[in-house]
Image (cartoon, rainbow, N blue to C red):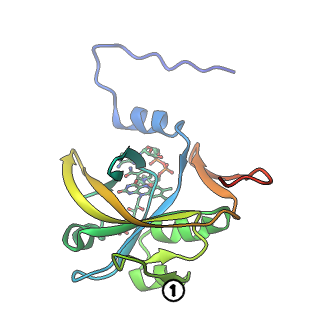
Amino acid sequence: MQTATPHHPTLPVEKQEFRDAMARLGTAVNIITTDGPAGRAGFTASAVCSVTDTPPTLLVCLNRSASVYPMFKQNHVLCVNTLAHSHESLSNLFGGKTPMEQRFEAAEWSTLATGSPILSGALVSFDCKITQITSVGTHDILICEAVALVRNDESHGLAYFDRRYHSLMRAANSGS
Ligand SMILES: NC(=O)C1=CN([C@@H]2O[C@H](COP(=O)(O)OP(=O)(O)OC[C@H]3O[C@@H](n4cnc5c(N)ncnc54)[C@H](O)[C@@H]3O)[C@@H](O)[C@H]2O)C=CC1
Ligand SMILES: Cc1cc2nc3c(=O)[nH]c(=O)nc-3n(C[C@H](O)[C@H](O)[C@H](O)COP(=O)(O)O)c2cc1C
């Protein structure tokens, strides 16, 4: 059944109405990590997308009021770890108010080029340096250039849609 939400063109879109609309956009789920002089930190993010492949660049949107914000701002490096379907509880751990040590104790990590934590079993990890930061409203858009990658071609994916997690099944013989 289709439910229309009429909206008067001259009225501003309310925050709740915007969130209800954004909940209709299915996304991948990622744990964004950093380490460096300001310390180790990580949070769950759905606001991640590809910007350009030349140079290989992603963007991540981070709320400036998050406890992890100063670490990302000061370390200037991060890793985008895209979650597999087995990572649902880890996603909640990094998306809640859990102390940082407890978040990292729940999984295995390594490092690659920048020193940012690489999640074992992630579908893909983009190890990045942060090249630009732009503030928009409550969030900063972190522009990130990938300097190294790890890919896992076995696991099924995890999607976030309609405020719930969904498994994304990989076809047999996929993985180009
Ligand atoms: N971009 C962000 O900062 C996001 C933050 N969240 C956090 O997780 C909580 C739970 O999210 P949901 O279960 O999806 O229910 P929700 O009703 O709070 O959010 C629905 C959708 O609105 C968008 N959204 C939520 N908070 C936002 C924010 N502060 N800035 C920009 N977009 C935002 C996201 O697309 C989200 O999936 C949110 O209240 C928020 O604290 C979740 C998704 C994205
Ligand atoms: C599925 C999901 C997606 C999220 N996406 C984002 C996001 O894209 N950007 C963001 O700033 N916070 C996002 N959050 C919220 C952060 O993960 C959360 O605020 C994080 O724990 C950092 O907060 P804290 O360090 O203050 O505890 C998301 C949370 C969940 C559960």
Using the image, determine if residue 135 lies above or below residue 21.
below
Which residue is painted at 33% across and 75% down in the image? 114
Quadrant of the image containing the N terminus: top right
Q: Position of residue 34 (x, y in %)?
A: 34, 74
Task: Please name whichever residue, 115 or 135, is drawn nearer the observer in this view of the structure.
Answer: 115
Q: Position of residue 81 (x, y in %)?
A: 49, 65
Q: Position of residue 109 (x, y in %)?
A: 50, 82
**Would residue 143 appear left or right of 21 to someone viewing this image?**
left
Task: Please name whichever residue, 164 or 130, is drawn nearer the observer in this view of the structure.
Answer: 130
What amino acid does circle 1 point to? Glu
SS category of the residue bearing label 1 = helix
**Residue 129, quarter of the rendered image:** bottom left
Number of marks in picture: 1
Which residue is painted at 41% across and 71% down in the image? 97
Which residue is painted at 65% across and 56% down in the image? 157
Q: Is residue 65 visible?
A: no
Residue denoted by label 1: 105
Task: Please name whichever residue, 56 or 39, is drawn nearer the observer in this view of the structure.
Answer: 56
**Residue 84, quarter of the rendered image:** bottom right
